[in-house]
Amino acid sequence: MIEISRVNKFYGKQQVLKDVSVSFRPGLIHGLVGRNGSGKTQLFKVICGFVLPDSGEVRVEGRRIGRERRFPQSMGLLIESPGFLPGYSGLFNLQMLAAMNTRLSKSELLAILGQVGLGEAAHRKVGKYSLGMRQRLGLAQALMRRPRLLILDEPFNGLDKRGVEEVRGMLRGLKADGVTILLASHNPEDIRLLCDSVHEMDAGLISPMAALKMP
Amino acid sequence: MRNFLRQLQRGVSNGGFLAAVALTLYSWWFVNSNASLSLSDPRAYFGSGDFSYHFRVSLELGFFHTAIPLAAMLPLGFWLCEEISTRYIDLALGRQNLRGYLSGRMAAAALSGALAVLAGSLIYILWLLLLSGPASTDEALTRMLAEHSVHGWRLLPGYFHVYVTESVARLLLSAMVWALVACGFSALWPNKAFVFVAVFAASVLLDALVGALFGQENRLSNLQVQSRGLEVPLNLAFLRQTLYLLGALLFSAFALFLRFGKGPKRAWQRARHWAAGRLAGGRARLGLMLPRAVCATGLGRLMVDLRAFLSVKTLLPAAIVPLILLFSGGAVPLRFSVGDLWLRVFSGLPWVEATWADVQGTALWAVLFSPVLLGNALNLSRELGGRCLSTLHRHPSVLAWWRGKCLATAAYSLAAVGVMFLSVLVAGLVMGARGVAVYRQGAEGFVSANTSVLWALFYVFLFQALVLSLMQTAVHLLTGSMQAGALAFLLPMMVCLLLYADFDRPRNGEVLFNWGMLARSELFSPALELTGEGEPLPLAAVPVQKALWGLFAWAAGLFLACTQLVRLVRVGERDLRA
């Protein structure tokens, strides 16, 4: 369970989150929509503990983020463009990230790379990856810890049609395993097909959406 | 034309331009740094001499040798790095042809570098005009000065404005040269840290090379500010500076051709394809090689940081730069040991009864440290940039995350210094060095093999690198700017050396440890002269033991402070786009 109550965040005079209160039930996919600069990424960063709110609190699994825990305990994260070491292979990058907080073998990491469609490119340098391949690697690093909470900000960016279908299938599978997923996307179809609840952000304010209108 | 004007506007309206103006201003001010009166009572200080006196002294004893290359590249020297990393170049090239795109930006980069130097110079000239005393009435002295100088009538009262204009114009020409060189280096490797270090190193090495091959008077630093005894007539100086400008233009054009030309691009792709085919298998087999038990522990996280920091890319310059300095330092004696070569490269500035600051020696000393500076800049920009988004939350706290980076920076400094010593060792063995130890006279007067000197040399050099690295790390973290971090590495060392280079011996001793003056220490320069009372006069008053302890205490203190500094910064709130 993620509970956000009365969160405000200012950067100078600009208020990017305005009295945001919302809760996300576990084991579901929650969508977040809104225009560019509406505060979606900032809200995600507050939930994952990267940004500390000026007032209000965020609780993940009952623990207050930034106080009782700095970051949520079991979390996978894909926000903006995660930086990788371009001179090393995708597998090596994953091995380095995995060694920080998990004990995964090389074969397990290769299986995750296969899941996101990078099986054949596992040994290729990240510097040679296309935008879509980097996005897939970003997904792989978010998924490899088998997290209970997955925060995905525009995960379908740069993916081809087949890649989008594969990732959608993967997210449905994770939901079935009980993973809570927060998903921001500008594509209404992703939100309509995947999400159990949808919230809209506009100029730092959050409000629930009853249904999404398809264009 | 509109493209050029837009770029010029971009060049003069950014933080880099302001930093360049400040650096130029500091270069003019540099000679007054030793006098506290210049700040506490500037009216009395500057009123004690006329404008021409203060102008000439500030120019001749300024910091321009180092400052002009740095100041020139700050406004727009990194445009190609920025436009490639943000992919803005794709948008720009879709709207205009390559030639127009490159020529407009190159011209704007050169001109904005020159304008920054001009603005800094004009502010100082205005300052002097407001505060300096009335013109000297000693006409005979002025006339004598004019007759004995290559500047001639331009130094006479009533004509001095011509000398001022000419001097500033020379600085501007040099600034344009280094701005163009920065564009060239950006094309070779669009990485800000590399360009920053490469331009600085090129300015020092080019001076050393031209000085050795074509005479000291033809060095660009001498043409921009003429040293006494090395003056070149005005028309010749401008002609030679124009040749430098032409050379810089050719270099940058060639570098841009290598980046954008179709032929070189195809050849480069083929070479990379060939290398990838041979390296891929080896890389795949090697892996991270971290024991499973260590993963997900503090040690595991540290090992990952170390692996990320100690890459070939960051350690390669450490192997190359000492060799360049070793071979550019003149002939090697017939019989030598590896220790002799280490002392030659790493023992700092030799003692000179200097009346002037040893600018070239100081700059070469800074070049020796440049691999460490470059490696730190690359590592920190990556870790504080986009990679933070995938590593930060894998640590128990931000403090633990940052402590790992500080430890890795310290380990990188150690590794880089190790590689530097190792590369000279390998070069020495290849050149036929006889053993490692150096021969030194002991207390009893006998000459014997000595290795303790070399250990002391290694430790002092290592701790200096460590202290500078930690200062760079702290400033990089606080400002989020790679350039500010690099300046925090370079400036304290250079200013310290330049300020203390002309210290007399007793005052030299007051400095706990003065950077880069290892060669002046009691260890490497045994006391040979005697004072009036028959006491040995130390050639330098740098006590090595004290210096080592001082450096150790400073490094430890800085490290502890650096690990805590992250509490002041909200790393996760920064713009972390890769």
Image (cartoon, coloured by chain):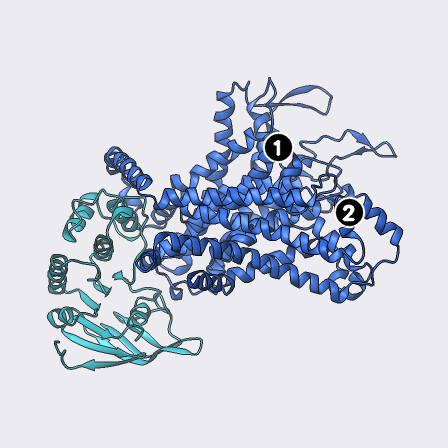
Chain colours: A cyan, B blue
Q: Which residue type does callout 1 highlight?
A: Phe
In this view, B195 is above or below B430: below
Q: Report the Cα–Cα distance between label 1 and label 2.
A: 25 Å
Place of residue A69 in the rendered image (x, y in percent of width and height, measured from the top left)? 34, 66
Q: Quadrant of the N terminus of chain B?
A: bottom left
Q: Secondary structure at mark 2?
A: helix
| Closest to the observer, B137 or A104 | B137
Q: What subunit carries mark 2?
A: B
Q: What subunit carries mark 1?
A: B
Circle on res. B214: 1
Q: In which image quadrant can residue B461 be found?
A: top right
| Closest to the observer, B511 or B229 | B229
In this view, A131 is above or below A122: below
Of mark 1 and mark 2, the one earlier in the sequence is: 2
Q: Quadrant of the C terminus of chain B?
A: bottom left
Circle on res. B225: none
Drawn side of residue B292 relative to residue B347, left or right = left
Drawn side of residue B260 relative to residue B449, left or right = left
Residue for badge 2? B152
